[in-house]
Amino acid sequence: MSSTLSNLKKCCIMAMVTFLIPCLSYSQKLVSVNTETNALVFTVNENNELNTLYFGDKLKNSSEYELIAKHYKQGTDYSEIYNSIYTPAGSKNLLEPAINITHTDGNTSLSLEYINAETNEVEPNVHLTKIVLQDKVYDLEVDLFFKAYYKEDVIETWTEIHNNEKGGIRLHKFASVNLYLYGDNDFWLTHYSGDWAQEMRPEETRLSHGIKVLDSKLGTRANLFQPSVFMVSIGKPATDNEGTVLMGGLEWSGNFRNEFEVDPLNNLRILSGINNYASDFELKKGEAFTTPKFWFSLSRTGKGDASRNIHNWARNYKVLDGKGTRLTLLNNWEATYFDFNEKKLKKLIEDADKLGVDLFLLDDGWFGNNYPRNADNAGLGDWEVNQKKLPNGIGTLVKTAEKNNVKFGIWIEPEMVNPDSDLYHEHPEWVIKQPMREEHYFRNQLVLDLSNPDVQDFIFNVVDGLFTENPNLAYIKWDCNSVIYNAHSDYLKDDEQSELYIKYVQGLYNVLERIREKYPKVPMMLCSGGGGRVDYGAMEYFTEFWPSDNTDPLERVFMQWEYSYFYPSSAIAAHVTDWGNQSIKFKTDVAMMGKMGFDIVVDELPKDELEFCQRAIKNYNELENVIWQGDLYKLKNPWKNELASLMYVGQDKKKAIVFNYLVNYRYEKGSHSPIKLKGLNPASIYEVEEINVFPGHEPIINKEHYSGDFLMKIGVNPKVSSGHPSVVLRLKEVSN
Ligand code: GLA
């Protein structure tokens, strides 16, 4: 790189984050994207190609960026584009490309030249940099976008490919991002594996030369085996409090592909985008293809700061109604499964009121008549109320809910169909399947073809119909249990078949867009047989997601720990259920660190347990703003300690809540020393009190006063032990 840069003696264009400077006196052409802490700086080489110069801590004096290159003594970059901002395939490229196409004339080479860059303020705090690249020979333009969220230190990036050629072109690969991190072959990747009930299992591995690929080919329930979110530490594995770490993820609810390539110069190239597996895309003359966005955030002070930035960004800009309130709920799934009737449900609705939650959520099993939904093998697709179970329809349940001062929500899985359904027989052409192949089922079901506008209308009408018939419907749980097998669309033409995976997701977003136009704020939970689908593309339409069907609270401590690096707690649904052998207190305390709900038979709770839950819900209501909108600090990592400890501090630092859970049940395990708290006001005096105390028990800490200084330097011991496996502390500022 240094040789390339030292040759640069041309007029410069430097696009800083807040303004466009057409020409500066620097010898290098630089384009930079700035957030409060970081700068991502690109430089134009002598061939007029745009390469990454730097990504890291912002320099005080921006004129010094041009001095960076001469301090690097890298090996030889034969192509001069190892660090390309967007690596084109087929010309001189030697590494993994970001874009690979076939031109109208059948030529497969691409070479991208820098044309210009411009940065504009989109709204206060948000600046959009557009960088235009153009093929040197063909009429193909590639526009790169970098949207910088200044205060949050988050950048979103995506690409638009414009076909200005004389005819159609074929896209074979079209990444959303092509990052280049300098780092002497010292990169630590944290990624996540999963399966049903085992979501978000972290693995940290030192990257070696070559390419590590993380991808999904599952189509719909795309995150079943792994999500697209990841972390890369540079220099050493970052902890919650120290180290340089980049977090990122693709905003796309379908097949993705993340590639991590340590190149011959020992630097890391990160490519992320729609998985190009079986996904060639035809771009007609005059058309543009927009990739999904990729978000990322860099912290030099550990994972904690990165995740707090991401939470702020998510609440301010991404998650639907991210700053808004959420509804606590009672769900009937584990209480009844498919076995319910009107009487049973009405009783449960009354129980929701007794418990003190905001909403009753009717889960799967309420629909289908010719093929009643009494198990998971029939009825999907037939969204009319099952007359036998609910002869008076949903309306009467909504009314009962109203009478009992709770809201009413309902489960749907509108993208899917059971072969045993009217829909399947009426519209076999709406089903994704290969005409010549045997059907292959996932949870006894198949996926509807959302590339087909008729199917999109059908799904929109399922939702719209529910709201039209039940205007007071207050919540939707949107499930998606099946992957796509035998990817083939009856609607798409033969030469468009490879576009199905992409057009499916575009179709899904179309539907969600229409729903949100008409019902902008109704809370919706994104579910996918547990956590099989969550990303910031989808979360623009959803208020929360279901992380896993595994609600064993011990498992959830670990799972929610990981999810909460990437998503704010208000979006992470956590329910108290029968899973796990722990006490109702432990279960409730764990649910309380997310968006709390219950899925139990309230009627069967012993008196003291009911009383405990009722009190815990009141405590939650009092502290919900701290949990949903506060700053999350991770204090004790459950993977490395005998307990997990984490806290939320309200934005004004007047209230905080500390959750502590025993995760090792061997002899004498627990908290033997004080745990240092974080994020408090050192000068303030806080009253510390154990809350969620089980009836008949004494609080471990009862309204003791400490300064924020003491709590952060010495800490407090929650006295977690096998006798007290979970302890929740509330902090209230009493003076400052
Ligand atoms: C999926 C969901 C569950 C429940 C069932 C209903 O498995 O993850 O929460 O809604 O479907 O069939």
Image (cartoon, grey):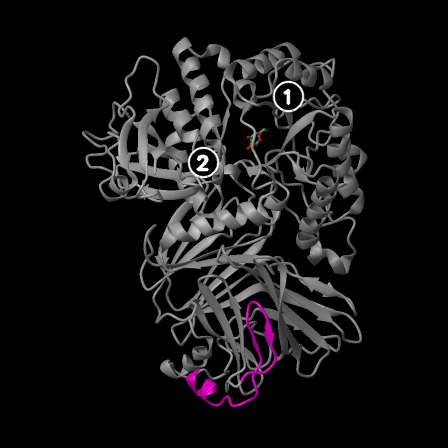
Q: Is residue 425 visible?
A: yes
Q: Secondary structure at mark 2?
A: helix
Q: Is residue 21 part of the magenta span, yes or no? A: yes
In this figure, which residue is indicated by the disc labeled 1?
A: 374
The answer to whether 171 appears left or right of 7 in the picture is: right
The quarter of the rendered structure image containing the N terminus is: bottom left
Using the rendered view, name the quadrant where residue 474 is placed: top right
The answer to whether 224 appears left or right of 303 in the picture is: right
The amino acid on which the numbered mark 1 sits, given as a three-letter code, is: Asn
The answer to whether 147 appears left or right of 288 in the picture is: left
- Residue at 47% across, 22% down: 617
Q: Is residue 270 part of the magenta span, yes or no? A: no
Q: Is mark 1 within 8 Å of ligand 1?
A: no
Using the rendered view, name the quadrant where residue 375 is placed: top right
In this figure, which residue is indicated by the disc labeled 2?
A: 626
| Farthest front residue in view | 736
Where is residue 164? Give x, y as percent. Answer: 76, 74
Q: CA distance from mark 1 to mark 2?
A: 41 Å
Where is residue 48? Give x, y as percent. Answer: 58, 84
Contact between marks 1 and 2 (CB within 8 A): the answer is no
Q: Is residue 736 above or below residue 120?
A: above
- Bounds of the magenta segment: 1-24
Q: Secondary structure at mark 1?
A: loop
Q: Is mark 2 within 8 Å of ligand 1?
A: no
- Residue at 35% across, 39% down: 646
Q: Is residue 121 above or below residue 616?
A: below
Main secondary structure found in the magenta portion: loop
